[in-house]
Image: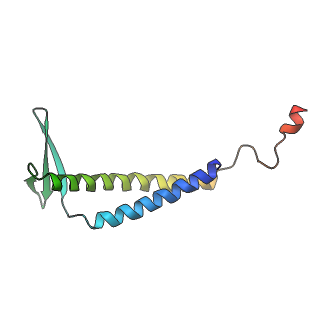
């Protein structure tokens, strides 16, 4: 597998990831996770309609919103990388053509 093939495979992987993550993100509840640091501890709050709701004894909800945050970041990063990889593939030219290299004449 050469560089071009591995880049094409990575591009396909990123597109699949974005599609799957967006599908999973649609099933997540609305709201946003907020963190507050105080005296060396981290407190989690759910922000809905401008109101903050404590998630102190709600570890499952906290994990759900942490997963939502992770998916959002992963989609964002993939959407940045996909156009860059497409541009790279359009401009990529191998340094040495595999069929027409001149190593044989140099070594003789």
Residue 38: give x, y in percent of width and height: 10, 36
Is residue 43 rendered to the left or right of residue 18? left
Q: Quadrant of the C terminus?
A: top right
* Residue pictured at 9% horizontal, 54% vertical: 52
Q: Nearer the viewer, residue 1 or 94?
A: 1
Q: Quadrant of residue 102?
A: top right
Residue 72: give x, y in percent of width and height: 32, 55
Up the image or down, 14 lies above or below 44; here it is below
Colouring convention used in this rendered image of the protein: rainbow
Up the image or down, 78 lies above or below 27; here it is above
**Count of labels shown?**
0
Q: Is residue 71 visible?
A: yes
* Residue pictured at 51% horizontal, 52% vertical: 84
| Farthest residue, direction front | 60
Residue 64: give x, y in percent of width and height: 22, 56
Residue 107: give x, y in percent of width and height: 87, 32
Is residue 84 rendered to the left or right of residue 89? left
* Residue pictured at 17% horizontal, 45% vertical: 35
* Residue pictured at 18% horizontal, 60% vertical: 31
Q: Is residue 88 visible?
A: no
């Amino acid at each position: 597998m050469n560089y071009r093939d591995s880049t094409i495979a990575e591009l396909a992987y990123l597109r699949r990831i974005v599609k799957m993550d967006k599908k999973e993100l649609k099933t997540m509840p609305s709201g946003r996770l907020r963190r507050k640091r105080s005296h060396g501890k981290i407190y989690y709050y759910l922000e809905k309609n401008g109101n903050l709701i404590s998630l102190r004894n709600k570890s499952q909800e906290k994990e759900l919103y942490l997963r939502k945050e992770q998916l959002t970041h992963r989609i964002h990063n993939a959407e940045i990388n996909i156009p860059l990889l497409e541009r790279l593939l359009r401009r990529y030219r191998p340094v040495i053509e595999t069929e027409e290299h001149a190593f044989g004449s140099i070594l003789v």
